[in-house]
Amino acid sequence: MRNIDWLFTDIRLPGVIDGWRVADEFRLTHPFRPVVYATAYAPEQARQQLHGSYFFRKPYRPEQIVAAFRRLSTDMPAGPGGAEAWPAA
């Protein structure tokens, strides 16, 4: 079984659970792993400064996401169970 290195989630998801909740649950079991958020809504940016997160506003270019994941893959510092905290981008 492979560990999850990071989470990519849209903030606005259909239904009652949003991307913030998905990320909160992910961080319960992976507190040192980075989260990449995406949204098209400006008010959501207020939470972008969460420790260890990246934030992309839609529309974003796919190569921006690929570059972020490459950075996460190559530059992830060692820490308990994986990555240390990452700055918001």
Image (cartoon, grey):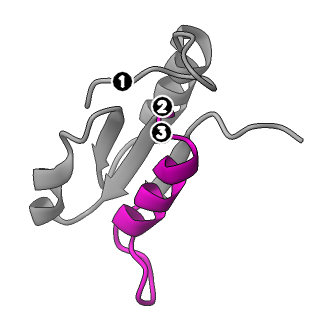
Q: Which residues are magenta?
A: 10-33
Q: Are marks 2 and 3 in contact (CB under 8 Å)?
A: yes
- The local secondary structure at tag 2 comes to loop
Residue named by callout 1: 86
State the separation of the CA atoms marked 1 and 2: 9 Å
Circle on res. 42? none
Number of other residues with Cα within 10 Å of mark 3, as a class: few under 14, some 14 to 19, many 20 or more: some
State the separation of the CA atoms marked 3 and 1: 11 Å
Which numbered disc, 1 or 2, marks the residue closer to the eye?
2
The x and y percentages for residue 72 are: 53, 22
The first of marks 3 and 1 along the sequence is 3
Q: Are marks 3 and 1 in contact (CB under 8 Å)?
A: no
The x and y percentages for residue 28 are: 50, 52
- The local secondary structure at tag 1 comes to loop
Which residue is pictured at 61% across the width and 19% down the height?
A: 73
Residue named by callout 2: 32
Number of other residues with Cα within 10 Å of mark 2, as a class: few under 14, some 14 to 19, many 20 or more: many
The x and y percentages for residue 10 are: 42, 62
